Amino acid sequence: MKTAMRHNEQVKPVTGTVRWLKPLIVGKTLGRLSITNANGKTEEYDIHAFIDGDGVVQGYGLAKDDDEIHSIDVTAGFGWTCDCPDHQFRNRECKHIKAVRAALAKCGQMPAAPQRQQPTPKAEKTSPQQQPATSVHHCTLCGNYPVEKGEDLCRDCLYPF
């Protein structure tokens, strides 16, 4: 397995599909996910939710049958984080985060977006003629990927607006 990247090598975007093999019931049972990458390689993970004393989801744990384990924290104010090398070293959303978001969105179990400290933008004086026809904003959940106003789902994490 190749562990080092050449400096000029481009990192391919994370793409693939996810499906529930067994639904997750938060606080009750483990779920099971099947994650298929763009190359067709499929891996199965048990998934469980980390919940606090008030029953609020703080994160998710993914475990493969070979005991490879990943933890996803959904409470970070700047987006979800995963402890896998792809997320840690490339500073991007990994397949684990994207798969869990997509799977949870499919079954309507998306946790609430964390409260964020957003910088207040400086007020600019513009006339109505100077306003663009469509303005781009960022998803309130992942904050990383721009979405067009008027769409009801984030293009990246499928979080509803």
Image (spheres, rainbow, N blue to C red):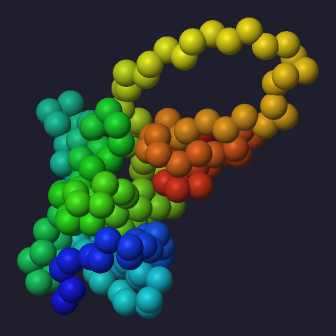
Q: Which residue, as the protein is rendered here, is positioned at the far right?
A: 129
Residue sitting at 21 percent across and 30 percent down?
A: 54
Q: Is residue 8 left or right of residue 73?
A: right
Between 112 and 68, the one lying in front of the other is 68
Is there any visible trace of residue 89 in the rendered image?
yes
Q: Relative to residue 123, is residue 39 depicted above or below? A: below
- How far across and how far down the image is residue 28, in percent? 22, 55
- How far across and how far down the image is residue 130, in percent? 85, 22
Q: Relative to residue 66, is residue 130 depicted above or below? A: above
Between 25 and 98, the one lying in front of the other is 98
Q: Relative to residue 65, is residue 88 depicted above or below? A: above
Q: Which residue, as the protein is rendered here, is positioned at the far front?
A: 8
Residue sitting at 74 percent across and 40 percent down?
A: 150
**Quadrant of the snapshot with the C terminus:** top right
Residue 112 sits in which quadrant?
Answer: top left
Residue sitting at 55 percent across and 39 percent down?
A: 138
Q: Which residue, as the protein is rendered here, is positioned at the far left?
A: 67
**Quadrant of the snapshot with the N terminus:** bottom left
- How far across and how far down the image is residue 33, in percent? 33, 73
Is there any visible trace of residue 29 in the rendered image?
no
Q: Relative to residue 159, is residue 107 depicted above or below? A: below
- How far across and how far down the image is residue 47, in percent? 24, 65
Between 27 and 98, the one lying in front of the other is 98
Residue sitting at 36 percent across and 42 percent down?
A: 79
